[in-house]
Amino acid sequence: MTMLLDDSRGTGAVSRELPPPPEEHDVGYAGGIGPSNIDEMLERVSRAAAGRTTWIDMESSLRTKLSSTEDGDIFDINKCFSVIDAVVKRGIHTQSNFLLPDEHGHGHESGHPNAETNKSKR
């Protein structure tokens, strides 16, 4: 069983405290984590976890408002890629192969830096 620790209770506010995970559960942390503070939050989660495997959760910070005149927002894959890049840069995970161009220069179709390279090679 896993647990999500979210001091913000789903509001997206940055958590003031990140408690250590209970020994009997694997945990994830949430609460104001996003592309703008991912480096700081990864450090805080790492300190709180004290060597335990954990995960992070974010939702509203990965969305972009459609426009100033419209209601609503969309999931922003470029924000996801900026978080992935921060995780890879810290050495927490390696970059997944599906994010990189294959031997033919084909890759994913997003705004990630590799995507422009991939499109120009087609």
Image: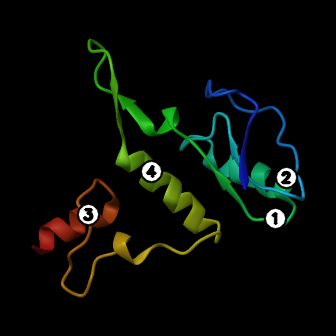
Q: Amino acid at mark 3?
A: Ala
Measured Cα–Cα span from mark 2 to mark 1: 8 Å
> The C terminus is located in which quarter?
bottom left
Q: Amino acid at mark 2?
A: Pro
In terms of sequence position, does the residue under pointer 1 or pointer 3 come before the other?
1
SS for callout 4 = helix
Q: Are marks 2 and 1 in contact (CB under 8 Å)?
A: yes
Instruction: Please provide percent x and percent y for residue 104.
Output: 18, 84
Circle 4 is placed at which residue position? 80
Measured Cα–Cα span from mark 4 to mark 3: 14 Å
In terms of sequence position, does the residue under pointer 4 or pointer 3 come before the other?
4
In terms of sequence position, does the residue under pointer 2 or pointer 4 come before the other?
2
The residue depicted at 87 percent of the width and 58 percent of the height is 24
Label 1 crowding class (10 Å Cα cut-off): few <14, some 14-19, many 20+? some
Label 4 crowding class (10 Å Cα cut-off): few <14, some 14-19, many 20+? some
What residue occupies the far top of the structure in this picture? 69
Label 3 crowding class (10 Å Cα cut-off): few <14, some 14-19, many 20+? some
Circle 1 is placed at which residue position? 52
Measured Cα–Cα span from mark 2 to mark 4: 25 Å
> The N terminus is located in which quarter?
bottom right
What residue occupies the far left of the structure in this picture? 122
Circle 2 is placed at which residue position? 21
Instruction: Please provide percent x and percent y for residue 8.
Output: 71, 27
Q: Amino acid at mark 1?
A: Arg
Q: Is residue 86 left or right of residue 76?
A: right
Q: Are marks 2 and 3 in contact (CB under 8 Å)?
A: no
Circle 3 is placed at which residue position? 115
Measured Cα–Cα span from mark 2 to mark 3: 38 Å
Q: Is residue 55 left or right of residue 78?
A: right
Measured Cα–Cα span from mark 4 to mark 1: 24 Å
* Nearest to viewer (mark 4 / mark 1): 1
Q: Amino acid at mark 4?
A: Cys
